[in-house]
């Protein structure tokens, strides 16, 4: 399988701040690939580079076999991008917005009619085609953004938080359509998301933290790296209890968002031991299998939702 995206020692700085630090990875053709990371992790800068909005500073990058420094026009012809920021003309109808985008790629005639009908049907917009965008809800506007980004059947699709504003049913429809694009047209889908259940559907996940790649693997393989069961403890003084857990029971626990988190094999056997060792000190204690959030915490030191909520 060939690589749709190849990055080698990619580094980008804003003055003295390093947004991307020696980033190297490959995304294979036809993959569903997700980037996760806290605010400031480097996701936005990376997407701006891949979408040709920023010029490379250091390192090398190629998309679909084309050099990101020299072949920008060729890349743009084969690239679809949906950013978080709105790009719709509110004074045009849904259909007019889609057709305007299609014209930029030279689509017309029967091909355009077929593609437009396909987009409208797949994204639940067929009955809204003649409505002005300014009259639509936020979720419907998001669907029009997605239709614009996919009207030309791109080989590589970059989606920045594509589910923003979509209701659960629309999110399911979106993922079904993305799966169909991959299956029928071999499209490579690269996205960021604020929903870990969406990230779980990816072939592979890359976690960025402070511009560095700190994890890269399949969802199952990433969960396996955490090891053991996940134990969460609520207590009045988590810092103090953390030290005492280490001293008395040899358990290493991290304070995350005011709670203690630790991973331990046979976690169910430790629940009673912890409660008995610290009578009256444990407000609540829960046990679960490792999740992607546990992986995220281990690799970045942040809860996933906390990281998203602090984003500007």
Image (cartoon, rainbow, N blue to C red):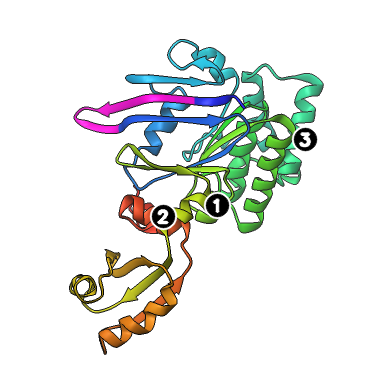
Q: Which residue is mark 1?
A: 200
Circle on res. 117: 3
Q: Between marks 3 and 1, how big is the CA–CA gap?
A: 30 Å
Which element carries disc 2, helix, strand or loop? helix
| Residue drawn at x 31%, y 27% as measured from the top left | 12
Q: In the rendering, at what x and y percent does residue 252 appear? A: 27, 65
- 285 vs 14: above or below: below
Q: Closer to the observer: label 3 or label 2?
A: 2
- Comparing 122 with 230, the one in front is 230
What residue span does the magenta drawing correspond to?
6-19
Q: Quadrant of residue 14?
A: top left
Instruction: From the viewer's perspective, tell me whether residue 106 is left or right of residue 295.
Output: right
Q: In the rendering, at what x and y percent does residue 49 appear? A: 42, 26
Instruction: From the viewer's perspective, tell me whether residue 308 is left or right of residue 149.
Output: left
As for residue 15 lying within the magenta part, the answer is yes
Sooner in the amino-acid sequence: mark 2 or mark 1? 1
Q: Between marks 3 and 2, how big is the CA–CA gap?
A: 41 Å
As for residue 285 lying within the magenta part, the answer is no
| Residue drawn at x 43%, y 58% as measured from the top left | 293
- 230 vs 114: above or below: below
Q: Quadrant of the N terminus?
A: top right
Sooner in the amino-acid sequence: mark 3 or mark 1? 3
Q: Label 1 crowding class (10 Å Cα cut-off): few <14, some 14-19, many 20+?
A: some
- 262 vs 146: above or below: below
Q: Quadrant of residue 28?
A: top right
Q: Which residue is mark 2?
A: 295
User: Residue lying furthest right in this view?
Assistant: 110
Q: Closer to the observer: label 2 or label 1?
A: 2
């Amino acid at each position: 399988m060939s690589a749709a995206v190849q990055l080698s020692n990619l580094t980008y700085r804003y003055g003295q701040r390093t947004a991307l630090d020696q980033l190297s990875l490959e995304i294979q053709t036809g993959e569903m690939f997700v980037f996760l990371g806290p605010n400031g992790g480097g996701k936005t800068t990376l997407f701006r580079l891949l979408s040709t909005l920023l010029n490379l500073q250091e390192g090398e990058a190629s998309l679909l076999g084309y050099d990101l420094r020299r072949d920008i026009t060729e890349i743009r012809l084969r690239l679809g991008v949906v950013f978080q920021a709105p790009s719709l003309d509110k004074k045009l109808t849904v259909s007019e917005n889609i057709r305007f985008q299609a014209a930029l790629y030279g689509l017309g005639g029967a091909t355009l009619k077929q593609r437009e009908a396909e987009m409208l049907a797949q994204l639940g917009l067929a009955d809204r085609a003649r409505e002005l965008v300014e009259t639509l809800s936020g979720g419907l506007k998001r669907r029009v953004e997605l239709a614009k980004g996919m009207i030309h059947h791109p080989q590589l699709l970059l989606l920045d938080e594509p589910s923003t504003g979509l209701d659960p049913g629309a999110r399911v429809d979106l993922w079904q359509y993305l799966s169909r694009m991959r299956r029928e047209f071999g499209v490579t889908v690269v996205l960021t998301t604020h929903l870990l259940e969406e990230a779980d559907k990816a072939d592979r996940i890359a976690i960025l933290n402070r511009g560095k790649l700190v994890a890269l693997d399949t969802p199952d393989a990433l969960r396996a790296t955490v090891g053991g069961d996940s134990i969460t403890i609520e207590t009045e003084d988590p810092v103090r209890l953390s030290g005492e857990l280490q001293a008395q029971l040899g358990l290493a626990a991290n304070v995350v968002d005011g709670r203690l988190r630790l991973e331990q094999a046979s976690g169910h056997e430790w629940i009673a031991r912890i409660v008995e060792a610290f009578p009256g000190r444990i407000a609540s204690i829960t046990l679960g299998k490792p999740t992607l959030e546990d992986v995220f915490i281990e690799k970045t030191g942040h809860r996933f939702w906390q990281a998203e909520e602090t984003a500007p």
